[in-house]
Image: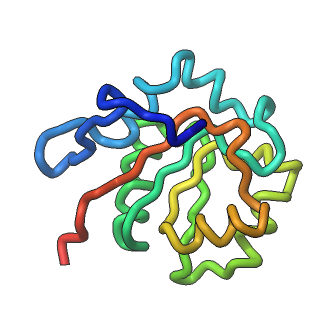
């Protein structure tokens, strides 16, 4: 169901081109976003927002954008292999019944592995951002 999309579901997410940044898209994409990102209302291992990007460098940039736009009110999980072990991601999702990870930003390989092994669930996910930007390098 999450993949059933229409053309109105796609927006440009390129802050370097003067477009909306991902933090702004999260705020616009979730009605009453502060309430929806509240860590007390999340389902086990299922973030409210999932951001998929091509590399760890890009993920770090997006995490900074999201934290800035949401004024650091919510924890943003880092889900990529650079300096973060797979087991750390699994523990992060299971810790405190998964209530501490309302936003997940990661690379396709890490997110896919977590999904396949059912450590990451999409039951409560209401917004998925697929970042198509390239790294500046």
Residue under the image location 57 percent in, 39 percent down: 2
- Above or below residue 33? Residue 3 is below
Quarter of the N terminus within the rendering? top right
- Find residue 32 and report its image quarter: top right
In the image, residue 35 lies at what x, y percent?
65, 21
Answer left or right for 136 relative to 98. left
- Find residue 94 and report its image quarter: bottom right
The image's colour scheme reads rainbow
Number of numbered discs on residues: 0
Residue under the image location 52 percent in, 36 percent down: 127
Residue toward you, 120 or 101: 120
- Find residue 132 and report its image quarter: bottom left
In the image, residue 28 lies at what x, y percent?
40, 24
Answer left or right for 122 relative to 10. right
- Above or below residue 8? Residue 17 is below
In the image, residue 97 lies at what x, y percent?
88, 48
Residue under the image location 35 percent in, 60 percent down: 61
Residue under the image location 63 percent in, 39 percent down: 125
- Above or below residue 96? Residue 110 is below
Residue toward you, 56 or 75: 56
In the image, residue 68 lies at what x, y percent?
40, 43
């Amino acid at each position: 169901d999450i993949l059933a999309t229409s053309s109105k579901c796609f927006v440009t997410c390129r802050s370097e081109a003067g477009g909306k940044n991902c933090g702004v898209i999260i705020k616009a994409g979730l009605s009453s976003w502060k309430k929806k990102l509240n860590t007390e209302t999340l389902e086990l291992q299922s973030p409210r927002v999932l951001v998929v990007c091509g590399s760890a460098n890009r993920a770090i940039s997006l995490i900074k954008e999201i934290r800035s736009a949401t004024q650091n009110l919510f924890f943003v999980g880092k889900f990529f292999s650079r300096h973060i072990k797979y087991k750390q991601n699994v523990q992060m999702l299971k810790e405190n019944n998964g209530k501490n990870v309302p936003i997940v930003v990661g690379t396709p390989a890490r997110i896919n592995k977590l999904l396949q092994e059912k450590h990451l669930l999409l039951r409560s996910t209401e917004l998925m951002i697929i970042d198509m930007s390239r790294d500046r390098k």
